[in-house]
Image: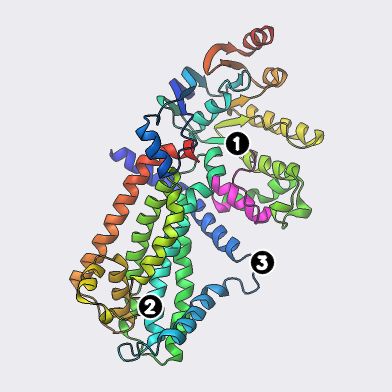
Amino acid sequence: MKQRFFEHIGTFVKYQNLLQELVIRDIKVRYRKSVLGVLWTVLNPLLMMIVITIVFSTLFKQSIPNFPIYFLTGSLIFSFNSEATTNALYSIIGNAPLIKKVYIPKYLFPLSKTVSSLVNMGFSLIAMFMVMIVTKAPFYSTIMLLPIPIAYVFIFSTGMGLTLSAVTVFFRDIAHFYGVFILAWTYFTPIFYPVSILPETALGVMKLNPMYHYINYFRDLILYGRFPGLKENFLCAVISLISLTIGITVFYRKQDKFVLFI
Amino acid sequence: MSKMVEVDNVSMMFNLHSERIDNIKEYIIRLLKKELFFKEFWALRNISFQIDKGDSLGIIGLNGSGKSTLLKVVAGILKPTLGEVVSHGNVAPLIELGAGFDADLSARENIFLNGAILGYSREYMEEKFEEIVSFAELEEFIDVPIKNYSSGMTARLGFAIATMNVPDILIVDEVLSVGDHKFQEKSFARMKTILDSGTTLLFVSHSIEQVKKMCNKALWLENGQMKMFGDTNIVCDAYSNH
């Protein structure tokens, strides 16, 4: 058992370079031939924010003082997860030619997708800081703790990505369904509306939505300058670890069969 | 002599229906009809052999006899249904040249990507970069995206990357016939150099001549079963007379 563990660590180190190359490839290919290139990672959330602000800000003027930042904090975290998981979902079936020809630890494919989404998220944070400066929002010292919720979401997304990529190999329907699921999830997450507009029952259900907790955590740090208590940290960590455990278990059990189904 | 590859009683089963069951509706229908694991196909049955360091094994047989499946099992791409494969040392698979090339990236970028796929570090690839480019004769086109390459150019690049290092075990599936006549000679010479430095080779070919020239042992597969294993000349002659 112990020896197996060290073997795993060994291959992980050996293939770390590949992980890096896959992430670089992802980012390069995505922005190839676009004039503005990587600048789009900053522009995209900015433009999105402008559209949503024009549409919704008057509606929620009373309950949300700085609407642009409220929206950006929510949407950055949410799209980090949705982008990471959607890309991870296709990562195994999309790399079929490679998996059939060379031995590579297969978890690298979904993992590389979550890592490149993480890099993207990093760029998008620049957009958020820019808007914070423009709207003269206060910079609290708690902003230094930003890596914590990002790490929670990263672990959560990696777990989901592993599960989705493995299950999609056997049931391609998931790929079609997931787009709808993400749309529903977007509306069921307080990204552009305040939680206060929800009725009591909906709020109870909302607490089962992992993204709700992550986004709250993120907003606490940036918008309200407070550090979430032990309870919130515990909750977020547990959700992330459950997701990761499920992901690793499902992936590990199914990975030898992938090559027969792709 | 130290053993490099030990194949112990390996059998590989494919489920011929599995290809089509990839949506839930189909799955449930077949589950109800009890057809789910209906048609089994054994591509390999009870294969056992060992090869020592410095050996080169030619695998011969008709189309569909399981040669490529066997190579994939040894390379670790397929996990055998039964039995076990143990290989000692790093394996360089040349199952298909240029597997893992990204058509949108340039040759320069693909060299690093492909190197990483084979498990080499970036520094090592930087060191070998010039050698690869000059072997593949692609100096002029190094920054052109691969999708604009001819198939011969892609294959040359793939071959150059896969063989720039001397691996412990080299697995080759019919890739020596890439490129024009000149490049074939060059790649053949490269293979010889690699073999002379003590690499263990597993080699699939339809050309008995090539097998005789390159290998000291041969394995004859027929319908997924071992028909004969031993000295190249004996096995090859038996196969030719068959």
The magenta segment? B96-123
- Which element type, helix, strand or loop, lies under badge 1? loop
At x 20% / y 70%, what residue is drawn?
A204
Label annotation for residue B35: none
Q: Which of A193 and A247 is in front in this view?
A: A193
Q: How crowded is mark 2: few (under 14 residues within 10 Å), some or many (20 or more)?
A: many
Q: Which labelled disc corresponds to residue A33?
A: 3
Q: Which residue is drawn at 44% across and 32% down?
A: B79
Looking at numbered disc 2 in the image, what kind of residue is underneath it?
Thr
The chain under label 1 reads B
Horizontal side of residue A241 vs B69, given as left or right: left
Question: From mark 2 to mark 1, how far is it between C-alphas?
Answer: 51 Å
Question: Residue at horizontal 20%, vertical 75%?
Answer: A200
B126 on left or right of A237? right
Q: Residue A73 carries which label?
A: 2
Residue B168 lies, with reference to residue B140, above or below; the image says above
